[in-house]
Structure formats: structure tokens, C-alpha cells
Image (cartoon, rainbow, N blue to C red):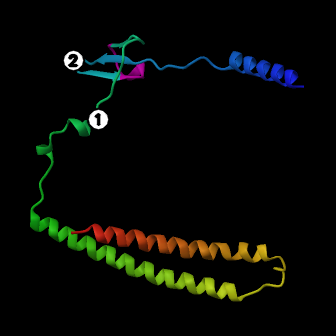
């Protein structure tokens, strides 16, 4: 029995390897426009003067963000930053107050639903299924409040 299973397994493995598509690789083109600007693309139709690069040649990418010097970023005065932080704190505190009200409402709805027993819920799993959305709503509000408190604690 084991030999038969092993033979079937090896046959399936061989068949899978034979039917697998060949490794796909994309072609990279070096394109030079009329002004002499060089760009690299995987699309040959991106401009005239495109020549395929050798597949053996390695291609790397450099993020534009990494190439910008720190001095190129705009500076904000301390007073402007304090004002932004103050506004942000006010917005977060308002959101926190709203979430606490919504949490209280969600808990009240859950409590109401827990007190209700419908006639077709002789199976306790049906009760749990009916209550689950209310429990999820309470849990979501609690996570929101926790995230807002963390965000507020990070402010200066």
C-alpha cells in the first residue's frame, strides 16, 4: 500500500513539474529621449530610443525620498508647531469624547439584548450568534478609545 501511494505521489509530482509554466522574467528597457534623459522601464512603448538590457545585468531602484537632502524639507517655526499640536490635541480629545459616548451606547444596547430571550432561541448558540454583533461593536469602541489615548499620550 505504501509503495502504491509513493508511486502515485511521485507521478503527481513529476506531472506537476512538467505542466508548471516556465519561470517568467520581465524585460527592462533603457530609454533615451530627445533631450538625452535616460529612463528605465519594463514597457518598450514608453518612447523611442529604447533598448533592452541584458538579463544578466542587475537592476536596482532608489527611492526619491532617500535621495532628497534633509535641508530640502521646509522648516516650521516652534510657535506654528505648538499651534498645530494644540489643534491636534483638541481634535483627538473631541474624538475621544465621541467614542466614549458611542461606547456607552454600544454597552447599553448589548445589555438590552442580553436581557431579551426570543422564542426561537431554544438553542443557546443562537443567542450567542445574535449577541455577537453587539459584542463586536463594544470591542471596536474600546479599541478606538485605546488608540486615541495612545495618540494623545504621544503628543508633546
Q: Residue 47: which numbered mark, if any?
A: none
How far, Cα to Cα, is label 1 from label 2? 22 Å
Q: Kindly state the secondary structure of the residue where label 1 is placed.
A: loop
Q: Kindly state the secondary structure of the residue where label 2 is placed.
A: loop
Please identify the quadrant where the C terminus is shown: bottom left
Residue 96 lies, in percent from the top left, at 38, 77
Q: Which residue is mark 2?
A: 36
Residue 89 lies, in percent from the top left, at 27, 73
Q: Nearer the viewer, mark 1 or mark 2?
A: 1
Q: Residue at x 11, y 54 (%)?
A: 75
Observer-nearest residue: 119 or 26? 119
Q: Quadrant of residue 24?
A: top right
Residue 143 lies, in percent from the top left, at 47, 70
Q: Residue at x 21, y 17 (%)?
A: 36
Whether the magenta-drawn stretch holds residue 46 is answered as yes
Observer-nearest residue: 67 or 148? 148
In the image, is residue 139 above or below residue 66?
Answer: below
Looking at the rendering, the stretch of residues picked out in magenta corresponds to 41-49
Q: Residue at x 40, y 68 (%)?
A: 147
Q: Residue at x 33, y 68 (%)?
A: 151
* Total residue callouts: 2
Q: Which residue is mark 1?
A: 63
Observer-nearest residue: 93 or 52? 93
- Residue 146 relative to residue 91: left or right: right
Q: Which mark sits nearer the N-terminus, 1 or 2?
A: 2
Q: Residues within 10 Å of mark 1 (few under 14, many from 20)?
A: few
Q: Quadrant of residue 114?
A: bottom right
Whether the magenta-drawn stretch holds residue 62 is answered as no
Q: Residues within 10 Å of mark 2 (few under 14, many from 20)?
A: few
Amino acid at each position: 500500500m505504501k509503495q502504491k501511494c509513493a508511486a502515485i505521489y511521485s507521478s503527481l509530482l513529476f506531472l506537476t513539474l512538467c505542466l508548471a509554466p516556465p519561470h517568467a522574467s520581465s524585460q527592462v528597457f533603457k530609454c533615451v529621449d530627445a533631450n538625452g534623459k535616460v529612463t528605465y522601464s519594463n514597457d518598450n512603448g514608453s518612447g523611442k530610443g529604447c533598448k533592452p538590457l541584458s538579463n544578466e545585468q542587475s537592476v536596482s531602484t532608489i527611492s526619491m525620498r532617500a535621495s532628497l537632502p534633509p535641508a530640502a524639507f521646509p522648516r516650521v517655526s516652534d510657535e506654528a508647531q505648538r499651534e498645530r499640536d494644540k489643534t491636534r490635541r483638541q481634535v483627538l480629545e473631541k474624538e475621544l469624547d465621541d467614542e466614549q459616548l458611542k461606547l456607552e451606547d454600544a454597552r447599553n444596547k448589548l445589555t438590552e439584548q442580553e436581557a431579551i430571550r426570543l422564542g426561537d432561541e431554544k438553542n443557546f448558540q443562537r443567542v450567542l450568534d445574535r449577541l455577537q454583533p453587539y459584542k463586536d461593536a463594544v470591542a471596536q469602541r474600546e479599541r478606538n478609545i485605546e488608540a486615541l489615548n495612545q495618540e494623545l499620550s504621544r503628543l508633546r
